[in-house]
Amino acid sequence: MTEQSRIVKERLEKIACLQKEGRKLYGSRFPVSDSIKDIINNFEEHKKVRIAGRVMAHRGHGKSIFADVKDASGKVQIYFKIDIVGEEQFHFFQKVDIGDIIGIEGELFKSRTGEITVKVDSFRLLSKIVQTLPEKWHGLRDTEIRYRQRYLDIIANEESRDIFIKRSQIITSIRSFLVKKGFMEVETPILQPIPGGAKAEPFCTHHRALHTDLYLRVAPELYLKKLLVGGFDKVFEIGRNFRNEGISIRHNPEFTMLELYQSYADYTDMMDITEELITGLVEDLYGGNEIPYGDKVISFKRPWKRMSYYEALKMKKGVDFRHKKASDIMRADKSVADKIDKNFEEADFLELAFDEYVLPELNNPTFITDYPVFMTPLAKRKEDDSELVYRFELFISGMELANAYSELNDPFDQRERFYAQKELLNKEQVDEDFLTALEYAMPPAGGLGIGIDRLVMLLTNAHSIRDVILFPQLRPERKESEAEAH
C-alpha cells in the first residue's frame, strides 16, 4: 500500500467515526465578514471577524492550537484555546485535517511574534478532505499533475494562482480599454456552417435536428465584418477559437482571441491601438515599460519598430525573397531540409524562411508589415503595389502576438481570392453569405486580432501556454495496465 493509499484509508475510517458521532462534515452557507487579505491590510485589534478557508497547517500546544487558514485572497494564523472555545469544539478541531475547509468566528489580535492572528470563538467544519494535498503542502512540481489537476496546482502554488489572477485582470483591463474607446462587445457563433476567417483545420461536429455538419469556429472574423456592414462601426469579441492542429508550448487546440474591427480606419490605426493597449497593460502590471521574459528584458517603449516582410527577410538572410523562389532558397539550406513538408506551397516556404531567419531575432515589439497578397486573402491590396497587402503581425520575444489588416471591402476582389484559395487548399465551400454581405457595401475598416493566451504568457513570464490556460488540452492518460505493458 502506498503512503497516499494509507492516508486515504485512515481518513475514510475517521470520516466513518465522525459520522457515527453525528458530526456534520459537509456544511452549507457560511457568510463571511471579510476576506483574509482585508483583515490583514485593515487590521484592528479586537475586531470581530467571520472568515472561511482551507486549513494549511496545524500546530498543537497542549491546551492551545495554532493553525493557518487560506482563502482566495491570502493566509492568516488562527488560535484555538480550550477555555475559550470549550472542550467539545477544541477536541473536535483536533480531528480536523490539513486540507479541510472550515468557517471561523473570532477576534483579531497580534501574537507575541507580531503575527496577525484570529482568536477563535467558534468554528464550523464546512467540507472534509479525503485525499491528501500534494508534497506535504509545500508545492506541486509535477507538471503533468499540475495541468491535469489544476485545482491542486492552484492550492499548492502561489505562482500559478497569481498567473490566473493576472489573466483575469488583463482581460478585464482589455475590455475596459476598448469600451472607453467606443467599441461595443458582441458575441458571434461558435458553431458555424462554413469554417472561415483563417487558414486552419477545423473541428467538425453534427447537428442531429438539422441533419447537417457544423464546424467549431477558427475565427469570428467574417461575422464581425458583417456587423460593420450592418452599421456597427466599432465592435470587438473576446472568445474561444478552435483549431484541429498540433499541441505545443505555444499552441492549444482551443484558445482565446481578441478580435476588433473599426470602420473608416486602417492597419495603421490598429498599430496605434495595439501599442496603446499593450503598453498600458505593461505599465499597470509592472509600473514601467520594461518586463523580464526568461533571461531577457523586453522594452515596450513607444514607438515600436516597423519593418516590411520582405525587408526583414533580406536583412537577416541577405537574399531578395521577393524576386527569388522561397522554395528554391529553402531547399538549398541543408539546416532546414528536415522541416520541409512534401505538400508545401510557395507560401509555406516563405513562412518557413521567416520562422527560421527572422523570428528568433524579434525580441522587442516589432511590427512586420506589407505581406504578399497570396498569403493574406482577407486584406486590402496596397495602392502603390498590388502584389502586397496592408497587413501587419506583431512579434515579441519570438512569438506572434497580433495580426491586423486594412480589411478588404471589395466584393469582386474578395470573391476572386476566395475561389483562388478554394482551389489551392482543396476547400469544398466558399462563404457566399459573407460575399453577399460585402455586396451591401462594407465601409473601409481596420481589423485586429490578439492572442490572449500568448499575451498572458508574455506578461506573466510564463514559457508554456499550458501555464496560462486553466485546463489545457492534454494527451489521454494511459491506464496502469497500458503503462506496465510499455
Image (tube, grey):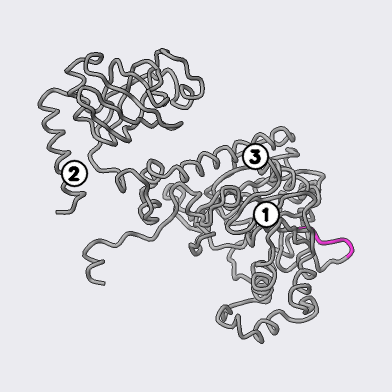
Amino acid type at image mark 1: Ile
Give the mark nearest the N terminus, 2 or 3.
Answer: 2
Q: Residue at x 63, y 60 (%)?
A: 399
For label 3, count other residues whose C-alpha is less than 10 Å away and answer few (under 14), some (14-19) or many (20+).
Answer: some
Q: Is residue 441 visible?
A: no
In the depicted view, which residue is nearer to us: 442 or 60?
Answer: 60
Which residue is label 1 attached to? 298
Count of numbered badges drawn on the protein: 3
Select label 2 or label 3 by which is in front.
2
Which residue is label 2 attached to? 8
Q: Work out how far the residue at label 1 is from the one at label 3, CA to CA, in angstroms.
A: 21 Å
Q: Residue at x 35, y 59 (%)?
A: 476
Pinpoint residue 80: horizontal percent, then vertical percent: 27, 21
Q: Which of the labelled discs sits on residue 174, or is there none?
A: 3
Quadrant location of the N terminus in the rendered image = bottom left
Q: On the image, which quarter does residue 347 sit in?
A: bottom right
In this picture, residue 277 sits left or right of residue 52? right
- In the image, which residues are magenta? 379-384
Q: Are marks 2 and 3 in contact (CB under 8 Å)?
A: no
For label 2, count other residues whose C-alpha is less than 10 Å away and answer few (under 14), some (14-19) or many (20+).
Answer: some
Tell me if residue 112 is in the magenta stretch.
no
Q: Work out how far the residue at label 1 is from the one at label 2, CA to CA, in angstroms.
A: 47 Å
Element under disc 2: helix
Amino acid type at image mark 3: Ile
